[in-house]
């Protein structure tokens, strides 16, 4: 009796599963067509986000760095033009502050280069302040020769490392 019941149950289960088998459709639905209507929400801005270093560099056309001659910290005409561009940006966005980083090349002692980097950063800050920016929006720091952008002991590398860099403070 048990064997007969098990056989009937097995056949019934197989029949039930066979009845559930789905046949594939004769044709597939069409691919969704691209929408041609305009987006409903506000347009997403493209490019760097306001208040970021990327936005600042983009707005000043990469002129966030000024360069100096050997053992000098004076602002020349090319530096003035770059700093004027930075001042225009900062005047347009009064909530943005910057740090001016002073750098030196590898020649000289650590102490000398830290002092020279500080004079370079302060020279850039003082020029920006003379253009009407509030001094409390501009911080300075000297890295001396500790953060070179160009490695090498030649005039080309040294020239790239004698700089002041304006960096947005978040």
Image (cartoon, helix red, strand yellow):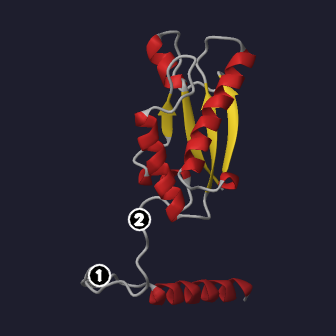
The disc at residue 43 is: none
Could you tell whether 159 is left or right of 121 in the image? Answer: left
The disc at residue 32 is: 1
Q: Give the tally of numbered discs.
A: 2
Could you tell whether 139 is left or right of 28 in the image? Answer: right
Whether 93 is drawn above or below 10: the answer is above
Secondary structure of the residue carrying tag 2 is loop
Point out residue 97 in the picture as x, y percentages from the top left corner: 63, 55
Whether 149 is drawn above or below 65: the answer is above
Name the quadrant of the C terminus: bottom right
Residue at 45% from the left image edge and 40% from the top image edge: 80
Residue at 71% from the left image edge and 17% from the top image edge: 112
Towards the viewer: 105 or 5: 105
Towards the viewer: 136 or 10: 136
Name the quadrant of the N terminus: bottom right
Disc 2: which residue: 46
Residue at 46% from the left image edge and 12% from the top image edge: 155
Residue at 62% from the left image edge and 64% from the top image edge: 95
Secondary structure of the residue carrying tag 1 is loop
Point out residue 59 in the picture as x, y percentages from the top left corner: 43, 54
Q: Name the N-terminal-most of marks 1 and 2.
A: 1
Whether 63 is drawn above or below 168: the answer is above
* Circle 1 or circle 2, nearest the eye: 2
Q: How crowded is mark 1: few (under 14 residues within 10 Å), some or many (20 or more)?
A: few
Do we see residue 55 in this rendering?
no
Could you tell whether 47 is left or right of 52 in the image? Answer: left
């Amino acid at each position: 009796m048990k064997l007969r019941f098990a056989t009937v149950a097995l056949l019934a289960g197989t029949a039930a599963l066979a009845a559930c088998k789905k046949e594939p459709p004769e044709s597939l639905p069409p691919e969704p067509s691209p929408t041609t209507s305009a987006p409903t929400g506000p347009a997403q801005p493209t490019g760097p986000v306001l208040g970021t270093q990327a936005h600042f560099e983009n707005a000043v056309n990469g002129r966030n760095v000024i360069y100096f001659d050997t053992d000098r910290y004076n602002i020349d005409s090319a530096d003035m033009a770059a700093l004027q561009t930075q001042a225009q940006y900062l005047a347009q966005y009064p909530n943005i502050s910057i740090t001016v980083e002073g750098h030196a090349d590898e020649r000289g002692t650590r102490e000398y280069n830290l002092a020279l980097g500080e004079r370079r950063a302060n020279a850039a800050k003082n020029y920006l302040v003379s253009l009407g920016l509030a001094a409390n929006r501009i911080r300075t720091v000297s890295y001396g020769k500790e953060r070179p952008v160009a490695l090498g002991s030649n005039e080309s590398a040294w020239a790239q490392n004698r700089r002041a860099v304006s960096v947005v403070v978040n």
